[in-house]
Amino acid sequence: MGFSTVYGNIIVLATFIILLSTLYTVYSDNMSDTGSAVKAQGSFLAERLGTSIGISEIATTTSDNDVSFYVVNDGGTTLDVNCTDFFIDREWIKRSEMAELVLTNVTFDPGVWNPGETLKMRVDYDTDHGAPHEGKVVTCNGVSASVIFQWAS
Amino acid sequence: MGFSTIAAQILFFIAVVGISAGVIAVFGSYIDQTKSAMSDKQQYIVGQLKTDIVISNIDNQSGHLFVFVKNVGKEQLKTDCINLYVDSGWVTVTPARITDPSTGSEATYLDSEDTIKIDPQAAPLGENSVHEAKVVTCNGVWDTESF
């Protein structure tokens, strides 16, 4: 094997290694970011799977049009109250319209909606008292519960 | 090994480095383009993986059709390219009709855990049949809901 062949091979090898290392660096960074994103996706999917709420009671007071939702966090995920959505008859209840939005049985960690705790939302909602209505609650991670209720006679 | 041999080896080495650099320079633009394409694709995939939406409510009564969409992912979403399909038909939604339901003002972005109200200029659909709404985000993540 002559010198020219040896040096030719060295040139090809050096070029190949440099190009490969450049691409590897980019690919490695990309895979790291993608890995983080997959982890984030897994985390919010797991969070949703662990989330469960139930509307344990809807109390109504016909005289002053008060509707109170009692929603229990019966899953294993700690939830945020501030991004929980309420609907009555498919109509969005604005936060500013709510007369009350409180956790009723806080045992620890106030400010967040822990498993086992009940969230109470009270609103003045004027609607037909004779017909059945639908109440719906949607948590921050998209888990929902709904119930049909009627005004107390 | 004599001086002439060492000098020749050095010359060869310099020549090898020079030629290698030349070859890399020739392929450099291809490498840059590949890097750029890989980064774009990666950003797109990461965006998709972090995106998730839920149609939390559909209000199809009282002469209107409102679709409430909640961002349950970790990515802030732009609202100007959100698409709404009702019964597989594309529905026109102008940006001004995508609002923050709390304030009623136009929502340009949909942050994580926030909700938007889509108010398409479409008549409410017949209440005696089942319909389907589909919302597609800018990066292709979608959710459907029957109502």
Image (cartoon, rainbow, N blue to C red):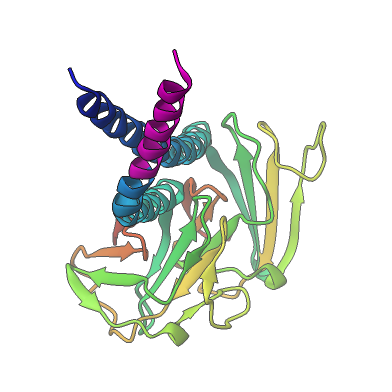
Q: x and y percent of residue B59 in the render?
A: 39, 71
Q: Residue furthest top?
A: B1
Q: Is residue A124 above or below residue A34?
A: below
Q: Quadrant of the N terminus of chain B?
A: top left
Question: In the image, is A12 to the left or to the right of A86?
Answer: left
Q: Residue at x 35, y 39 (%)?
A: A19
Q: Which secondary structure type mostly characterizes the magenta part of the structure? A: helix
Q: Residue at x 53, y 64 (%)?
A: B115
Q: x and y percent of residue A93 in the render?
A: 59, 68
Q: Is residue A65 above or below residue A144?
A: below
Q: What span is in magenta?
A: B1-20
Q: Residue at x 30, y 28 (%)?
A: A10
Question: In the image, is A99 to the left or to the right of A94?
Answer: right
Question: In the image, is B57 to the left or to the right of A129?
Answer: left
Which quadrant of the figure has residue B88? bottom left
- Whether residue A79 appears in this view of the structure is yes
Label total for image: 0
**Toward the viewer: A127 or B49?**
B49
Which quadrant of the figure has residue A95? bottom right
**Toward the viewer: B86 or A127?**
B86
Q: x and y percent of residue A119 in the render?
A: 69, 46
**Toward the viewer: A76 or A56?**
A76
Question: In the image, is A60 to the left or to the right of B99?
Answer: right
Q: Quadrant of the C terminus of chain B?
A: bottom left
